[in-house]
Image: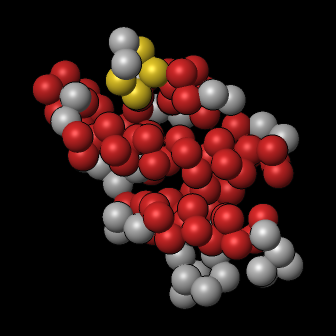
Amino acid sequence: MGLAQYADDGLFAPTKIADAFRTTKDEVARSAGLGRDAVLRAERLRSDKTQRRLREMIEIVNKVEPRFGSALMAYAWYRSEPLPGFSGATAMALVQQGRAGDVLDYIDAVDAGVFA
């Protein structure tokens, strides 16, 4: 899915993300390492940190979606599959720690056959 599907008026929209992943806005916030207010209060939703974390989560899910066949399955992987080399941390845990770049690098390495 494209990034635009998850956006409204140029901002990532937690409601659209929650609908696509069949979850709640609270879970979307938690999955991105954000507090509940970050997705419920308009001024917090517009903040750079909130939009960056939502973008990072969507980029990761979009990048692995072809592997799993659906955004919902890719989101399940993001939340629950421990990544080798990261002490059992999931992609979600790494994003929550501000390490989305490490997850994207790991996915690129897998795609290049480094961890095959």
Residue at figure coordinates x 77%, y 80% from the top left: 114
Quadrant housing the C terminus: bottom right
Which image quadrant is residue 2 in?
top right
Any part of residue 22 in sight: no
- Colour scheme used in the picture? secondary structure
Residue at the top extreme?
Answer: 9
Q: In the figure, is residue 26 to the left or right of 94?
A: left
Q: In the figure, is residue 78 to the left or right of 66?
A: left
Up/down of 88 relative to 44, above or below: below
Q: Position of residue 87 (x, y in %)?
A: 54, 87
Q: Position of residue 82 (x, y in %)?
A: 63, 74
Q: Camera-side residue: 73 or 9?
A: 9
Up/down of 44 relative to 57, above or below: above
Residue at figure coordinates x 70%, y 37% from the top left: 71
Q: Position of residue 4 (x, y in %)?
A: 54, 21
Q: In the figure, is residue 69 to the left or right of 61?
A: right
Residue at the front extreme?
Answer: 112
Q: Position of residue 102 (x, y in %)?
A: 50, 71
Q: In the figure, is residue 9 to the left or right of 105?
A: left
Residue at figure coordinates x 82%, y 51% from the top left: 67
Any part of residue 99 in sight: yes
Which image quadrant is residue 108 in?
bottom right
Numbered-mark total: 0
Q: Camera-side residue: 15 or 84?
A: 84
Residue at figure coordinates x 65%, y 42% from the top left: 62
Quadrant housing the N terminus: top right
